[in-house]
Image: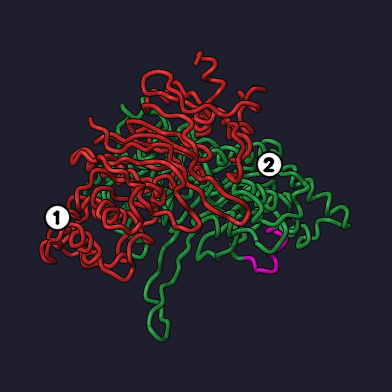
Amino acid sequence: MTNQETTTNVTMDTAEGGIAINNLKMYFPVRRGIFKTKVADIKAIDGVSFSIKPGETLGLVGESGCGKTTVGRCIMRIYKPTEGSIVFKGQNISEVSEKKLRPIRRDMAMVFQDPYSSLDPRMSSGSTVGEPLLIHKLTKSRQEYKDRIDELFTIAGLSPDMADRYPHEFSGGQRQRLSIARALAGDPSLIVCDEPISALDVSMQAQILNLLQELQEKSKKMSYLFISHDLLAVQYISHRVAVMYLGRIVETAKSDELYSNTCHPYSQALLSAQPVPDPVEEETRQRIILTGDLPTPLNPPPGCAFHTRCPKAVKECSESTPVLRDIGNEHYVACHRV
Amino acid sequence: MGRLLTVNNLTTEFKTERGTVRAVDGISYHVDEGEILGIVGESGCGKSVSQLSLMQLIPTPPGRVVAGTAEFSGVDLLKYKKKSKEMCSIRGREISMIFQEPMTSLNPAMNISKQMSEVLINHLNVDKKEARERSIDMLAQVGIPDPGKRIDDYPHQLSGGMRQRVMVAMAMLCTPKMIIADEATTALDATIQAQLLELLHSIVDKYRVALVMVTHNLGVVARYADRINVMYAGRIVETGTTKEIWANPMHPYTEGLISCVPKLGERLEPIQGKPPTLINRPNTCAFLGRCKYRTDACFKEPVADLTHFEGQHATACNVRLKEAGR
């Protein structure tokens, strides 16, 4: 873990916002038999380090099962990580007790993929958005509470008189705006967006992306961890991008650098698999079609986890695990062949 | 290239408690032999319902095809009864469908061998042994490793991409004339989606099958489709070859769709608002509320029919057609 540590500013001062994650591991035990003895671990995240500065967006990209959502959930402490540190607001929250977490959680929020299941169908949209205000006791009077809800609705691009309606009366895009309004209630410095636009229609996706970007520009210190499999959206909204494969980050760089100078074979394949909506460009574009499926994290391949599908793999790749190393211009790649 | 399917004025309605929803509102289009047609639109625009209508797979009630013809190799599909012998011999044999979620289209309690053989035994009257052999052969063609063994697997033993390959194999078993892929790659991961699209493309090429790709992903159709129909609120608002549409999107909705896909360094221009409800729609343009080119006349005039512009390019926008002098 020598090189991987250098990739992030572990000593980064997070008092002003932002987050630093170091060597994060999350193993889920597999239990079998009547005694439920542990037979193996699913290594959902296996040593991930990164940091997000205040006002910055980090895009986390990868296919399903690569552990990107687990990273988001560890940060929110929905899961207690197996190992590693998550430094937020100057303290390591990976070990903090549930009780002490509550005030910290005010400062972080999450927007989920499915706006249909992440909103309580029996709660009016106003009380959904207002719930964090009550939990964290952020408003002093009934009037202040109502005003704040109106304000949040307006910020998220919804009309305040919709506050009496229930989630089923909203469209998908509006529901996602509700989730964003709820996330903003505690005035957080970090929002984990887990596939926030995947369940939406194309025209709604663009609206939500723009909304997220405007909110960040306004607040100046708010950071996003933007988890998605949609490379075009990630490229649009992120300052930096990290590509994950089977529980590890394989490449990370500034957004334009990663897209103009893609180094890791997996990132290259991922990028070329993304359909580009332009028939003229598509005609000339080379496509790398990977063979096979993602291996199971229960029994990941030895060496570089990608070598089973990698078009450039050599013998070394199946023997030793590559670590992230700096190739200049804040660009880090974990590949023997680069 | 001969004409394979000609759809004329297809209209499908659903009865609901709040009124009648006209999900497909008099659409006309055609599919040529061996071509790839993309049908693009947002959820609820009627793209899936239009395809289900011609296959006679609309649940009745509440849905009903109220008007239109669909001439497929000389016969009108909509004349047949749902469960008639003729319709059953077309579904799966002449026209196959591949759906979005392979886990729900495959029977979880039956192994692949049985599910695939069923198709062959019902349609082509082959015996069990031959059906199995042909299924294995087809699985090999869609790139399933070790098909002789995998054919005895149950759907849950396969990954998402593999399941969708099985669906492709099943759709191809009787070498149909047309395949309808309804969001067939949407549920898959990027790299698997790319694999499957290439596979579909190569199969269509090899067997000269017509492919209708129903999708909301413009990127997918941009690469593979020869022609595109853009649907909005139950109607086709623009049609043309892929290149025509990209070079010169005529309908404001198409233009909006293209510009709301993120590009590097450009600010996104989303389409404002949301699609209208389809209950008791007036006869004006459905895109009116979201359109940035609308004129006062748009609010009064009924919406134009799909009118040819040049080449294969046609649009249903009053403003644009007037500009072009039509």
Which chain appears green? A
| Mark 1 lies on residue | B137
Q: Which mark is residue A221?
A: 2
Q: Residue at x 24, y 48 (%)?
A: B94
Q: Is residue A99 magenta?
A: yes
Question: Residue B15 placed where, x, y %?
Answer: 55, 54
* Residue depth check, mark 2 versus mark 1: number of the one nearer the observer: 1
Q: Are marks 2 and 1 on the same chain?
A: no
Q: Residue at x 70, y 49 (%)?
A: A181
Give the quarter of the figure containing the N terminus of chain B.
Answer: top left
Element type at marker 2?
loop
Q: Colour of chain B?
A: red
Q: Is residue B184 visible?
A: yes
C-alpha span from label 2 to label 1:
59 Å
Foreground: B320 or A79? B320
Q: Is residue A68 left or right of residue B166?
A: right
The structure residue drawn at horizontal position 40% and vertical position 66%, both measured from the top left corner, is A42
Q: Eyeballing the image, is A37 above or below B228?
A: below
The part of the image, by quadrant, that contains residue A73 is: bottom right
Q: Nearer the viewer, residue B75 or A104?
A: B75
Task: Name the chain letter of the residue that bears numbered label 1.
Answer: B
Image location (x, y in percent) of residue B228: 39, 32
Residue A109 horizontal side relative to residue B130, left or right: right
Helix, strand or loop at mark 1: helix
> Which residue is at the front of the view, A333 or B149?
B149
* Secondary structure, magenta segment, majority class: helix
Amino acid type shown at disc 1: Asp
| Residue A252 located left or right of residue A16 | left
